[in-house]
Structure formats: C-alpha cells, structure tokens
C-alpha cells in the first residue's frame, strides 16, 4: 500500500526538489496557497508523514501575514493532528534566520523552531 506524503508549500523550491526525488510508491498530497482548507484537513487525516515547507518569505508582506503564515499554519497543523488523534511525523524546514533574527521573518521562524507548540499526549 502506498504511503501518503503531505507536502506543504508544494510550489516552492524545497518541495519541488523533494517531489522529484520521491519513489513512485508514494502518494503525494500537495498543499499550497491555492489549496482549500477542507482539502488540508482531509490530507492531515490520511497523511503518513508531513514535509512542512509552507511559509511566507516575501519581505513586502505585512507582519501579521508573515506570522499567520509561518506560525499560524504550523500551529493549525499540530492542532488538527491532535484533534484527529494522529501521531503523524512532521519534518519542518526552518531557516538560519531563526537563529540570527534580524526581521519579522526571523521572528516568525524562531517562534516555530524554538517555541513549544501545544502538543498534548495522544493515547
């Protein structure tokens, strides 16, 4: 049976590189800005592993948009997995900017990388 691999930020460089190197025995679930929330919810309910590459990188976006995209989406994914009682592994791609914070992008990446997201015990 094929494993379901969810890739967020599926139109980006990391995702396209990963996708081109995956074996044909996986079912890739693509999530990007054009994907509806209900589709993400369904993907989270069936994903066997998640590669979370989605996030805002444009310096021209608002601070709120940056935080919502980088922190909010990650917390949403975690919250939904908890709600679904799924223990799906998440591979999260961060940035050197989380260590060397110089702007809102770095703050948002650090918030996900170094902040404890709500992860209650799933039995």
Image (spheres, rainbow, N blue to C red):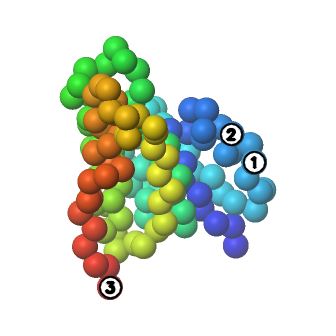
Q: CA distance from mark 3 to mark 1?
A: 34 Å
Circle 1 SS class: helix
Residue bearing the label numbered 1:
21
> Mark 2 and mark 1 in contact (Cβ < 8 Å)?
yes
Looking at the image, the residue that sits furthest to the bottom is: 123
Q: At 60% from the left edge and 62% from the top edge, which residue is drawn? A: 4
In the depicted view, which residue is nearer to us: 34 or 104? Answer: 104
- The image shows residue 43, relative to residue 101, as above or below, that is below
Residue bearing the label numbered 2:
17
Residue 3 placed where, x, y %? 64, 66
Residue 108 placed where, x, y %? 30, 37
The answer to which image quadrant residue 107 occupies is top left
Residue bearing the label numbered 3:
123
The label nearer to you, 3 versus 2, is 2
Q: At 53% from the left edge and 52% from the top edge, which residue is drawn? A: 51
Circle 2 SS class: helix
User: Can residue 112 be seen by looking at this rendering?
Assistant: yes
- The image shows residue 42, relative to residue 101, as above or below, that is below
């Amino acid at each position: 049976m094929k494993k379901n691999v969810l890739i967020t930020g599926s139109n980006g460089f990391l995702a396209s590189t990963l996708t081109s190197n995956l074996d044909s025995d996986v079912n890739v679930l693509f999530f990007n800005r054009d994907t509806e929330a209900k589709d993400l919810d369904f993907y989270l309910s069936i994903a066997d592993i998640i590669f979370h590459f989605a996030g805002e990188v444009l310096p021209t976006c608002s601070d709120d948009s940056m935080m919502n995209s980088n922190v909010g989406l990650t917390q949403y994914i975690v919250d939904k997995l908890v709600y679904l009682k799924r223990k799906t592994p998440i591979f999260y791609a961060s940035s050197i900017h989380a260590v060397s914070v110089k702007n809102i992008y770095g703050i948002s990446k650090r918030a996900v990388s170094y902040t404890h997201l709500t992860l209650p015990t799933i039995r």
